[in-house]
């Protein structure tokens, strides 16, 4: 029973396990980096617990979450309307909805909101993109708040300058440099996946076409 459950959920278990390992590693490494900076400035080192509440840690964490959720939310939304010939990441070129997207084809196993009419159906049919983009907004705001704290911490150490507010930090090049350097990499990597998957394959992966599929086969079109 346990082995079967683990196998059935192995992808999410490995992904979340890797997240836990790497965020712990980031926190420990960042703590040492921050304490080196404090010692060089003649300030007492932070405890690990204090570091986890610092702008240094929050900014580094949330600016990456922000870009990931932007990428995923935008990708889910864009693939609902745009196509790429030959890519398994695209829907078919005819642009038609799948039969399962029509509430008239709902079955007794379908989620309750999937076959409702009105606002419930509208929300549910767009719920994945909505939630991912909501996570982006929350991460963006968190990055802005943590980034302001990190900026003030750094300015205090280096120049003793007075603290600035969140809206002041939002108008700095520093904030937008942090955001844009992550956003561009996310969209570049997804664009590379869309294009490379036209001619390259990975046996067994749902992100790849079948190994024997023609290069111009698009999405889930039949071979």
Image (spheres, helix red, strand yellow):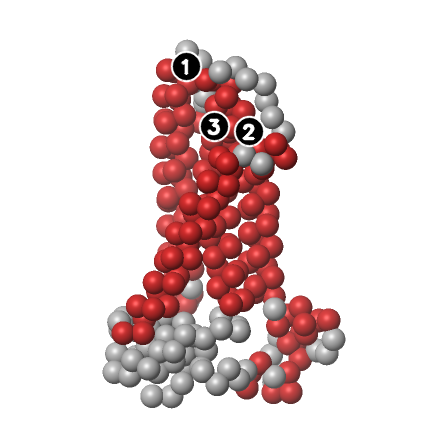
Please tell me which residue lies in front, 106 or 139.
139
Disc ID at residue 94: none
Residue 38 position within the rendered picture, expressed as x and y whole percent measured from the top left: 42, 18
The residue depicted at 41 percent of the width and 35 percent of the height is 27
Asked whether disc 3 touches disc 2, contact meaning CB atoms under 8 Å apart, the reply is no
**Location of mark 2 (residue):** 149
Q: CA distance from mark 3 to mark 2?
A: 12 Å
Total marks shown come to 3
Left/right placement of residue 46 relative to residue 121 reads: left
**Picture disc at residue 41:** 1
**Closest to the observer, 111 or 102:** 102
Q: Is residue 98 visible?
A: no
Q: CA distance from mark 1 to mark 3?
A: 16 Å
Q: Residue furthest top?
A: 42
Q: Nearer the viewer, mark 1 or mark 3?
A: 1
* Crowd around label 1: few <14 · some 14–19 · many ≥20 (10 Å): few
Looking at the image, is 150 positioned above or below residue 207? Answer: above
* Relative depth, front residue between 119 and 96: 96
Instruction: Tell me the SS state at disc 2.
Output: helix
What SS does tag 1 mark?
loop
On screen, residue 162 above or below 10: above
Look at the numbered disc 3 and give the secondary structure of its residue.
helix
The image quarter containing residue 162 is: top right
- Mark 3 crowdedness (10 Å alpha carbons): few <14, some 14-19, many ≥20: many
- What is the quadrant of residue 12 in the picture? bottom left
Which residue position holds label 3? 51
Q: Earlier in the sequence, mark 1 or mark 2?
A: 1
């Amino acid at each position: 029973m346990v082995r079967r459950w683990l196998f059935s959920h192995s992808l999410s278990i490995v992904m979340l396990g890797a997240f836990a390992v790497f965020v712990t590693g980031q926190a420990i490494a960042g703590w040492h980096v921050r304490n080196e900076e404090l010692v060089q400035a003649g300030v007492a080192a932070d405890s690990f617990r204090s570091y986890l509440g610092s702008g240094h840690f929050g900014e580094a964490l949330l600016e990456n979450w922000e870009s990931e959720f932007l990428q995923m939310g935008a990708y889910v939304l864009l693939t609902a309307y745009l196509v790429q010939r030959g890519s398994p990441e695209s829907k078919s070129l005819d642009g038609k909805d799948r039969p399962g997207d029509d509430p008239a084809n709902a079955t007794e196993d379908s989620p309750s909101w999937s076959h409702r009419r009105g606002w419930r159906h509208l929300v549910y049919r767009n719920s994945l993109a909505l939630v991912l983009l909501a996570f982006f907004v929350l991460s963006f705001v968190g990055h802005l708040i943590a980034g302001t704290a990190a900026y003030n911490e750094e300015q205090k150490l280096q120049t003793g300058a007075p603290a600035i507010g969140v809206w002041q930090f939002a108008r700095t090049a520093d904030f937008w440099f942090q955001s844009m350097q992550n956003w561009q990499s996310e969209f570049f990597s997804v664009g590379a996946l869309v294009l490379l998957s036209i001619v390259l394959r990975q046996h067994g992966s749902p992100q790849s076409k079948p190994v024997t599929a023609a290069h111009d086969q698009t999405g889930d079109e039949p071979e």
